Amino acid sequence: MLDQYSLQTGAEGFTNITATVEKSLAESGIRDGICVVYCPHTTAGITINENADPDVVHDLLLGLSAALPDRPEFRHAEGNSAAHLKASCVGSSAAVPVKDGRLILGTWQGIYFCEFDGPRRRTFYVKILEG
Ligand code: ZN
């Protein structure tokens, strides 16, 4: 099965999508396997990071912007090369093992949709494979 979800993002930010992924897993009935979360965008991504302190995702965005600023040498005419760089750094997917019907996430881990060039209507997919 492949579940498709959409979300409306803000200009830049991380959206915790863990509960949505867990819903897909529960509906699949799969007890053991692997769960892949994927987004088909070039200026957005998927990452796993801390879900307890919201300052962490704030700092992640701050750090990514500091490390990957917009540069006058960039050629891409759309003008959003920094967002493309950030998307490549975080990646477009995450894979989480499934055991006993649950995602194997650490206590402080959450799955995030990362927007780097919003606001936009975005899509992500959840695929759960048994095995
Ligand atoms: Zn672009």
Image: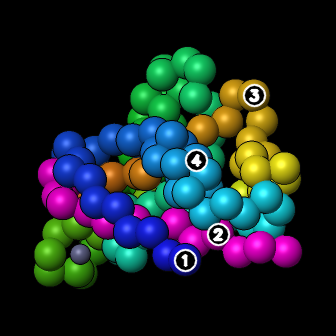
In what element is the residue under mark 1?
Answer: loop
Label 2 or label 1, whichever comes before in sequence order: 1
In what element is the residue under mark 4?
Answer: helix
| Quadrant hosting residue 50 | top right
**Relative to residue 128, is residue 1 drawn left or right?**
left
Are the two marked residues, 2 and 1, in contact with CB atoms closer than 8 angstroms? yes
From which residue to which does the magenta span run? Answer: 118-131
For label 4, count other residues whose C-alpha is less than 10 Å away and answer few (under 14), some (14-19) or many (20+). Answer: some
Q: Is residue 120 above or below residue 34?
A: above
The reply to whether the magenta stretch includes residue 126 is yes
| Distance of label 1 from label 3 (alpha carbons) | 27 Å
Which amino acid is tagged 2?
A: Ile
Q: Write the residue at 48% across / 20% down.
A: 55
Are the two marked residues, 4 and 3, in contact with CB atoms closer than 8 angstroms? no
In what element is the residue under mark 2?
Answer: strand
| Distance of label 4 from label 1 (alpha carbons) | 14 Å
On the image, numbered disc 4 is attached to which residue? 22
**Relative to residue 28, is residue 84 drawn left or right?**
left
The reply to whether the magenta stretch includes residue 64 is no
**Relative to residue 21, is residue 30 drawn left or right?**
right
x, y (%) of residue 119? 15, 51
Residue 122 shows in this picture: yes
On the image, numbered disc 1 is attached to which residue? 1
Which of the two discs, 3 and 2, sits closer to the camera? 2
Ligand 1 resides in the quarter of the picture at bottom left
| Distance of label 4 from label 2 (alpha carbons) | 11 Å
On the image, numbered disc 2 is attached to which residue? 128
Which amino acid is tagged 4?
A: Glu
Which amino acid is tagged 3?
A: Thr
Disc number for residue 107: 3
